[in-house]
Image (cartoon, helix red, strand yellow):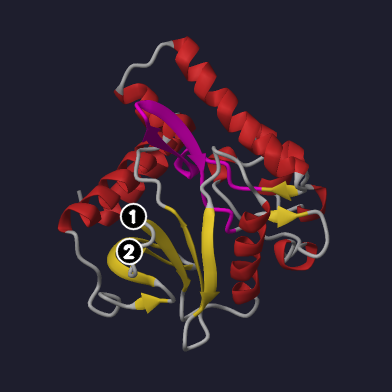
């Protein structure tokens, strides 16, 4: 299916069943990510590039704010592969500050169901980056359907997501984009573990993080429409609090 046809199909599907449309988007994203890993290569501009002690070995995804690269520890001190998020060179004014704020917010969070921040820094060209735990499993909703998990297990996994969300709220952090595609899964010692990712538009209610995390203009809609609370969809940023995440 051509990209334009796929976009039209998803828009039509979302009008009839928003939850199913979100799940299809998650499947498409997971499929694209799997292809990147199978190809095992990075874009020529990034292959072998170093970010401090980390070396790029592949590419995971690209977005408006930046690129996510597959990395490994060059000195062998860290066995597992990692995700390296780098700010896009074509960033708009203020986006660099928001990007840095995402890293600072992640540094405040310490929960087994939130992807961990491992390192952060700035490239020799002044582009900020941070290194995160790599989560390669499918979105939680997708995994539940694929494995036909019983209701009790689904609820148990969902409670872990709620606990992680509460942890963020206790740290005065609102995610603001808790969509199904931002709750991935890892399998650790044979157990499924949900992982909340992408705090790119998160907002902190506490200093000194408030200024960067709250940089959203009134009337601007940010996030995934199908999962937004009414006040967020209307761009009423001053009205958004922890209840928006609970709604999502």
Residue 31 magenta-highlighted: no
Quadrant of the image for the C terminus? top right
The percent position of residue 131, horizontal first and vertical second, equals: 47, 63
Q: At numbered mark 1, what does the secondary structure look like: helix, strand or loop? A: loop
At x 80%, y 65%, the residue is 208
Q: Quadrant of residue 67?
A: bottom left
The magenta segment: 175-200
Q: At numbered mark 2, what does the secondary structure look like: helix, strand or loop? A: loop
> Would residue 146 be found to the left or right of residue 91 on screen?
left
The percent position of residue 151, horizontal first and vertical second, equals: 46, 11
Badge 2: residue crowd in 10 Å (few <14, some 14–19, many ≥20): few
Q: Which mark is residue 79?
A: 1
Q: Which mark is residue 242?
A: none
Report the residue marked by disc 2: 76
- Identify whether 55 is placed above or below 167: below
Kindly tell me whether residue 2 is visible in this rendering. no
Residue situated in front as seen by the camera: 105 or 14 = 105
> Would residue 116 be found to the left or right of residue 35 on screen?
right
At x 61%, y 55%, the residue is 106
The percent position of residue 147, horizontal first and vertical second, equals: 31, 21
Residue situated in front as seen by the camera: 168 or 65 = 168
Residue 177 magenta-highlighted: yes
Q: Quadrant of residue 237?
A: bottom right
Badge 1: residue crowd in 10 Å (few <14, some 14–19, many ≥20): few
- Identify whether 159 is placed above or below 132: above
> Would residue 82 be found to the left or right of residue 225 on screen?
left
- Identify whether 57 is placed above or below 89: above
The percent position of residue 112, horizontal first and vertical second, equals: 55, 38
- Identify whether 62 is placed above or below 16: below
**Distance between the Cα atoms at labels 1 and 2?**
6 Å
Asked if disc 1 and disc 2 are in contact, CB closer than 8 Å, the reply is yes
């Amino acid at each position: 299916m051509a990209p334009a046809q796929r976009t039209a199909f998803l828009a039509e599907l979302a009008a009839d069943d928003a939850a199913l449309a979100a799940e299809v988007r998650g499947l498409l994203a997971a499929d694209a990510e799997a292809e990147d890993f199978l190809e095992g290569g990075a874009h020529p501009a990034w292959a072998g590039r170093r970010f401090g002690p980390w070396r790029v070995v592949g590419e995971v995804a690209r977005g408006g704010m930046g690129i996510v690269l597959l990395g490994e520890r060059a000195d062998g001190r860290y066995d597992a592969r990692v995700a390296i998020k780098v700010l896009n060179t074509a960033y708009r004014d203020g986006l660099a500050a928001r990007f840095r704020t995402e890293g600072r917010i992640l540094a405040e969070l310490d929960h087994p169901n939130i992807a961990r921040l491992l390192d952060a820094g700035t490239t020799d060209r002044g582009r900020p980056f941070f290194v995160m735990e790599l989560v390669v499993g499918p979105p939680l909703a997708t995994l539940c359907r694929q494995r036909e998990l019983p209701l009790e297990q689904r609820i148990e996994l969902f409670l872990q997501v709620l606990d992680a969300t509460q942890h963020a709220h206790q740290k005065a952090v609102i995610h603001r984009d808790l969509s199904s595609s931002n709750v991935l899964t890892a399998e650790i010692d044979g157990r499924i573990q949900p992982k909340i990712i992408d705090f790119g538009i998160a907002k902190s209610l506490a200093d000194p993080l408030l200024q960067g995390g709250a940089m959203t203009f009134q009337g601007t809609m940010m996030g995934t429409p199908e999962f937004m609370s009414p006040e967020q969809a209307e761009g009423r940023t001053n009205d958004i609090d922890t209840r928006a995440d609970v709604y999502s």
